[in-house]
Amino acid sequence: MPIMEKETERDRGSQELPKVPVPPLKQTLDTYLKCVRHLVKEEQFKKTKAAVEKFGAPGGVGEVLQKKLLERRDKTTNWIYDYWLEDMYLNNRLALPVNSNPVMVFPKQMFKDQKEPLRFAARLIRGVLEYKALIDARALPVDFARGQLAGTPLCMEQYYRLFTSYRYPGLKTDELRVRASAAPSAPEHMIVACKNQFFVLDVVANNKQLNEMEIFTQLEKIVKMSESAEERLPPVGILTSDGRTEWAQARDALMKDRVNRDSLAMIETCACVVCLDEPGGLQPSDTNRALLMLHGGGRERNGANRWYDKSMQFVVGMDGVCGVVCEHSAFEGIVLVQCSEYLMKYIAGSTMAKSTTFREIPPPRRLLWKCNPHIQGLLTASGDRLQRLVDNLDMDVFKFSAYGKEFIKKHRMSPDAYIQVALQLAFYKCTGRLVSTYESASIRRFRQGRVDNIRSATAEALAFVESVADERATFTDSQRMSRLREAVKAQTDYTIAAITGMAIDNHLLGLLRIAQELKMEKPEIFCDETYLASNQFILSTSQVPTTVEMFCCYGPVVPNGYGACYNPQSDHIVFCVSSFWENTETSSAVFVKALNEGLLEIRDLCNRCCAAAAKPANGSQGAGQPHKSGK
């Protein structure tokens, strides 16, 4: 179960925001049927419709659960928060790297010597301390919504968990704990990982924070200490890369020794982890940098130089591969972006000042571990499982350079909705069908708001992609363009519904959880094959835009799926497509090829229709003629 901050410690501004609404039951059930109708066979849809009608019948189970859900809304700050957090993260038993933790990949750094990475890390740490001071003082300016319904103030609570949260592994369910922020002058520490060893870096000495030069000096000491072979300790960090139940069992074994308990306590209460990575040994492509950030390259590279439970892990590679790995249960991508952009600007804008005064600062402390044959066996097993995950991840970071969001805006369409339709087209080109798709939609307009799901595989998107893929050329350009605009509008309408608390996924989850709490027999709607399939998100997508040159990526959420994170810029779009090699149905390279083709086809369609509309009436021959797409 998540343990939240006390009410008095929460952001006062967020209390002025409205609570997340509970949508009308009939509206959700009607939308659910509309979302799944075109994705399942007719025979299956009849069963689904019957189950939905039974659930929503007057005086039926649905109305009983809806009434209880409305009561829960009245009694809680956010009726969905705990249900969603447990379902999305804490109950999930998969390993955090690749499966859960997203990463932000910073621009490649061109370090000239071995001191430059440490200077970069020292500046980064100073930037973190400054950003954390703004958070602790509640001095961050309030975020306002961009895109659809722009200008609405947003809940800021996720920022207050950046440096105070920790995800504890559990045998059946994890626990997200959030500490109250320490006073600015209180002793505070970070953990530095180097050569699979962990060191305590106190960032306050004699009630004063370390300056950049002092941090740099401490980092130099850490690197030197890590090179001492005779003091090399077991790579305990690799345990945090394992499945959550396996890591919980390993943690229990570690906790039997006081030395290990003390070391774990230091890591679990730190502000963040800074990972000084050895050179990854891969060509410095965007794809390889993404891979190294997601899993460290496995046990033979930097896979054990991590502590995946900590919400923020800053990675500084000696070869210039840098970024941040985040534990996702505490906050969403936009908060990670805002923090990362602040740090990049801080690093670019500051130079290390020469210290005029010299302070005697205690050296960093190495964390010690007691390891017996049982724990050694667990380390080996965790390393084997991480290596399988590393070998299985098929990642392709693709920069689409033909156009960006300005072209899309010129044609009076939402860039996000347009890109979502293009992703549907790419999937259809690969498989000849559409599947249940997840696009995260922020609900930070509400108190403690996290996300709901935009179901992008709409009937309108299917109609459009079928018209583009039609080999018989039975559709005119104007018909295709009409279908494109309908698909973009359907996507935009669903987005607005989701960000205003009217999407279906959180609501259905809430109804299911209330039924479980009442110890009712699981309603038929939730046992139905369609419901189970509709929650297997074969296409998991997210828009993570940045104003600084960097990109976000993550792995697929199901074995036969794709992860597709994208960053639209004015004249290009960065896509990070992931899948698993073990699944023969998926290929990131094949998907990227189809995505590239589809984006060009949609552009050409827009341009032809635009040119046709601009022609005088007597010069429009051919504008309405069938056009074979892509030929």
Image (cartoon, rainbow, N blue to C red):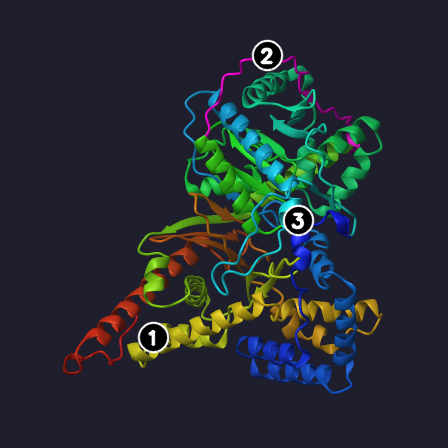
Q: Name the residue under label 1.
A: 481
Q: Earlier in the sequence, mark 1 or mark 3?
A: 3
Badge nearest the viewer, 2 or 1: 2
Q: Residue at x 56, y 54 (%)?
A: 556
Count of residue discs: 3
As drawn, 605 above or below 206: below
Disc 2 residue type (three-letter): Phe
Q: Mark 3 points at which residue?
A: 330
Whether residue 148 sits left or right of residue 10 in the image: it is: left
Which is nearer the N-term, disc 2 or disc 3? 3
Q: Give the range drawn in magenta.
A: 350-374
Residue 381 in the figure: left or right of residue 217: right
Q: Viewer-nearest of labels 1 and 3?
A: 3
Who's the residue at 46% across and 40% down the image?
288
Label 3, secondary structure: give it. helix
Q: Which disc is residue 358 wearing?
A: 2
The residue closer to the viewer here, 302 or 220, is 220
Q: Position of residue 284 (x, y in %)?
A: 42, 36
The kind of residue on which mark 3 rests is Ala
Q: Looking at the image, do the residues carrying marks 2 and 3 touch, with CB atoms under 8 Å apart?
A: no
Per the model, the C-alpha gap separating discs 1 and 3 is 41 Å
Instruction: Give the side of residue 152 with respect to residue 524, left or right.
Output: left
Q: What residue type is labelled 1?
A: Met
State which mark lies toward you, 2 or 3.
2
How many angstroms separate mark 2 from mark 3 (CA)?
Answer: 39 Å
Q: Earlier in the sequence, mark 2 or mark 1?
A: 2
Magenta-colored stretch includes residue 349: no
Please tell me whether residue 368 belongs to the stretch shown in magenta.
yes
Q: What predominant SS class does the magenta segment belong to?
A: loop
